[in-house]
Image (tube, helix red, strand yellow):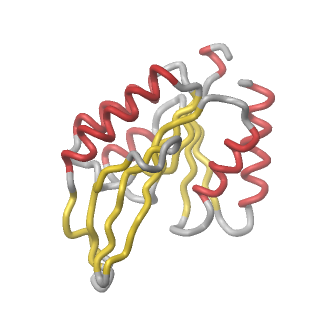
């Protein structure tokens, strides 16, 4: 894989539309060393805990935020988890993996400079980045969207399968 052909591929779209599913289907088609993170949630009564979780080893995780289900609102952000665990996970991926998954980038990391710097390091690396951008208008997300090396796919119910095929075609023809 030559540096000049690599891209950072991101999916965006409504919550629950299948963005993460598409990423996992892409990974099933590629024979590469992959790590990065996804966000998993656990509900406890009216609270929902969000964990940043390693793609490769789901036992490696850290609590990044807690939300109130009844208010549909994040009530606590654990910036140390993102700035320490999350940043270290991403920076290690840059050193050891062919593909880095960033699932997802939203508003929770707004004040987490170490984490955001790790994301920028991944985007600037010679590694393929597959990620999800939350549909959110924020400085950090907008800076990623506007990069020349980012290809952004908006996923909806009608184009889910087509988006998967299109991304696989881009990867097979241009990069792998």
Give the side of residue 37 with respect to residue 17, left or right.
left
On-image quarter of the C terminus: top right
Give the side of residue 89 with respect to residue 128, left or right.
left
- Judge whether 18 appears above or below 25 on screen: below
Q: Position of residue 29 (x, y in %)?
A: 76, 40
Q: Position of residue 38 (x, y in %)?
A: 47, 51
Please name whichever residue, 172 or 30, is drawn nearer the observer in this view of the structure.
30
On-image quarter of the N terminus: top right
Q: Position of residue 57 (x, y in %)?
A: 49, 43
Task: Classify residue 119 by image quadrant.
Answer: top left
Q: How many marks?
A: 0
**Residue at x-position 28% and y-position 49%:** 109
**Residue at x-position 39% and y-position 45%:** 60
- Judge whether 128 appears above or below 85 on screen: above
**Residue at x-position 27% and y-position 77%:** 68
Q: Position of residue 104 (x, y in %)?
A: 45, 51
Task: Classify residue 175 by image quadrant.
Answer: top right
* In the image, farthest residue toward the front: 59
Please name whichever residue, 138 or 175, is drawn nearer the observer in this view of the structure.
175
**Residue at x-position 79% and y-position 48%:** 165
- Judge whether 55 appears above or below 106 on screen: above
């Amino acid at each position: 894989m030559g540096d000049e052909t690599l891209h950072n591929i991101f999916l965006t779209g409504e919550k629950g539309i299948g963005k993460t599913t598409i990423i996992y289907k892409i990974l099933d088609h590629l024979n590469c060393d992959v790590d990065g993170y996804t966000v998993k949630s656990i509900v406890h009564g009216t609270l929902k805990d969000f964990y940043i979780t390693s793609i490769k080893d789901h036992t490696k995780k850290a609590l990044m935020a807690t939300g109130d289900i009844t208010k549909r609102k994040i009530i606590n952000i654990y910036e140390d988890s993102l700035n320490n665990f999350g940043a270290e996970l991403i920076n290690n991926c840059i050193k050891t993996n062919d593909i880095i998954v960033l699932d997802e980038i939203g508003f929770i990391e707004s004040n987490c400079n170490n984490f955001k710097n790790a994301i920028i390091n991944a985007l600037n690396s010679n590694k393929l980045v597959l990620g999800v951008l939350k549909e959110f208008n924020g400085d950090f997300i907008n800076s990623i969207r506007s990069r020349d090396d980012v290809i952004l796919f908006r996923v909806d119910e009608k184009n889910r399968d087509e988006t998967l095929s299109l991304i696989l075609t881009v990867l097979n023809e241009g990069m792998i």
